Amino acid sequence: MVSIKASARIHSGLISMHENAYRKFGSVGFSITNPYLIVNTFRCNSGIKITDERLEKITNDKIIHLLKIIEDIYRYYNINGGCEIIIEGDLFPHMGLGSGTALTLSTIESILILNNINYNDSDLIALSKRGRTSGVGIQTYFKGGAILDLGQKFNNCHWAPSSLNFATNISNLLSRIDIPDWEVNLIFPHTKNKIHSNKERDFFNKNLPLDEYESFRSSYHLIFGLFASFLDNDKKSAINSLQSINDLKWKELEITNQPASSDLLEYLKSKGINASMSSMGPTLYSFSTLKELSIKNFNYLTTKPNNQGRVLLNV
């Protein structure tokens, strides 16, 4: 058996979202310790079985997609036999915390280890077909920390999220740094609005491209604001940057698409607490303390940064 533990990531925002740019996409985000998922992979004589034991499970179409990736790997490496995969943990699908990338990479890596196949990070990324829009999830999987990626050279392919972006190249990593040992609070609105797959693709198609000025603003607040605050160990600047990130056009659109998250952000703001939304939500995050707030309309989890990436538990 091989077991891999992969933690959540916060996706703070995309950067270059206008036409005729030097580069397309690019992003800033960081890894956190909780929540996490564990992928346990067992060898068996034949067949491939996936069991999701989490309270919130992946849908049948996601299971089919993951099965296809596994079958392709078995054919490509000429692997005999089969496997059983059991998914555990509290990193649930479609919360804006990178569970899809974490699950895909963990599954691929566990199969290669189980079958004594040599590989490097690039092999896993290529097999996963992730990281074409944003490099945050694929980089935090291996390294943790805070990530700044430059996207890829501008092309005329459709604007699409990483899960549905079939560009040849992955987003290029510019910088990875450790995050100071700050308290990070995740805030979970009570909502059933989960944005993924076709809904996410349609959102990109409807709202992109943006005006080039919005890309310039995103560059400043995500890099000189949030990313630099990690580098300087300046928690006050990190807290202040979150409100500026919310005012960026792309993040504003993402937040508006999540009414419960939008309402909750306004409530937190009225209490003097800066927070922002990870990816397309609905999960919010803050570097401020929330202990004195009522939790009637939401739940929250206090966690810490993760500067090491995934952990091989049983190899």
Image (cartoon, helix red, strand yellow):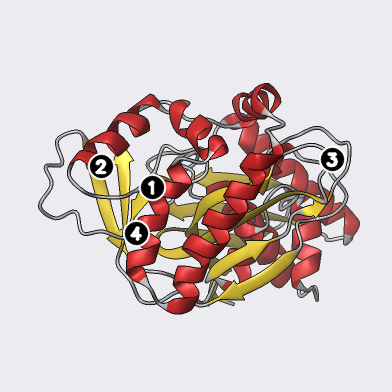
Residue 216: give x, y in percent of width and height.
65, 49
Mark 2 vs mark 1: which is more N-terminal? Answer: 1
**Quick one: 229 or 25, which is closer to the camera?**
229
Provide the residue designation for mark 2: 269
For the residue carrying disc 4, how many other residues have a C-alpha within 10 Å: few (<14), some (14-19), or many (20+)?
Answer: many
Task: Please name the residue shown 56% across and 48% down the image.
Answer: 13
Mark 3: few/some/many CA within 10 Å (<14, 14-19, 20+): few
Q: What is the number of the mark on residue 11? A: none
Going 72% across and 31% down the picture, which residue do you hit? 209
Helix or strand or loop: what does disc 2 sit on? Answer: helix
Considering the numbered disc 1 on the image, is that residue within a helix, a strand or a loop? helix
The earlier-in-sequence mark between 4 and 3 is 3
Task: Return the residue at label 3.
Answer: 20
Q: Report the Cα–Cα distance between label 2 and label 1.
A: 9 Å
Alpha carbon distance from label 3 to label 2: 36 Å
Circle number at residue 239: 4
Identify which residue, 71 or 148, lies in the foreground. Answer: 148
Distance between mark 4 and mark 1 Cα atoms: 8 Å
Do the CB atoms of the residues marked 2 and 1 lie less than 8 Å apart? yes
The one nearer the camera, 42 or 160, is 160
Label 2 crowd (10 A; few <14 / some 14-19 / many >=20)? few
> In screen coordinates, is 31 left or right of 128?
left
- Give the mark nearer the N terminus: 1 vs 3: 3
Q: Which residue is mark 1?
A: 243
Q: Quadrant of residue 29?
A: bottom right
Task: Please give the name of the residue rendered at 41% of the width and 69% of the height, measured from the top-left corner.
Answer: 305
Amino acid identity at mark 2: Lys
**Within the image, what quadrant is residue 2 found in?**
bottom right
Is residue 260 visible in the rendered image? The answer is yes
